[in-house]
Amino acid sequence: MPSNKIRILIVDDSDVVRGAIRALLQEEQERFEAYESGDAEGAIEKAREIEPDVILLDMSLLGVSGVESRRFRESFPEAAIILMSAQDPMVLQKLTELAGLKMCIAKTELSTELLPMLEKIANGLNT
């Protein structure tokens, strides 16, 4: 029986950040299924395996050029990619646009903004 859960791949090199996001998603475990990777290469492999609906991607893994973000976008065009960073939200929004992505979240806002953002994505997937 296929799962109706939204598959989320958390890509961050910090165990603490991945753990905090997992804890947030645990609140909605009937809706979201979390997977994780600590590096970009491992994330590509994991994404091929699970075909995520959402990829939460730490900007610090991407480098200045955003080449990795394009690689994720091209490899997984069906996935919603959310760029995460400790950057100021205004700076993060500009960097997100430069990387050719549409969604971002500051790590300082994860506890209040992540679940509502995922809810919007989930609603779009289920329409």
Image (tube, rainbow, N blue to C red):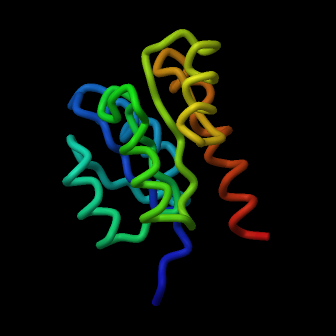
Of residue 103 and residue 116, the one placed in the foreground of this image is 103
Residue 110, image x and y in percent?
A: 51, 26
Work out whether 29 lies above or below 78. above
Q: Is residue 90 left or right of residue 105?
A: right
Residue 105, image x and y in percent?
A: 56, 28
Q: How many marks?
A: 0
Which residue is at 57% across, 67% downward? 78
Looking at the image, the residue that sits furthest to the bottom is 1
Which residue is at 62% across, 38% downward? 103
Of residue 126 and residue 68, the one placed in the foreground of this image is 68
Work out whether 84 lies above or below 5. above
Q: Is residue 87 left or right of residue 37?
A: right
Which residue is at 30% across, 33% downward? 61
Residue 108, image x and y in percent?
A: 49, 15
Work out whether 47 lies above or below 2. above
Which residue is at 60% across, 24% downward? 112
Of residue 101 and residue 31, the one placed in the foreground of this image is 101
Looking at the image, the residue that sits furthest to the right is 127
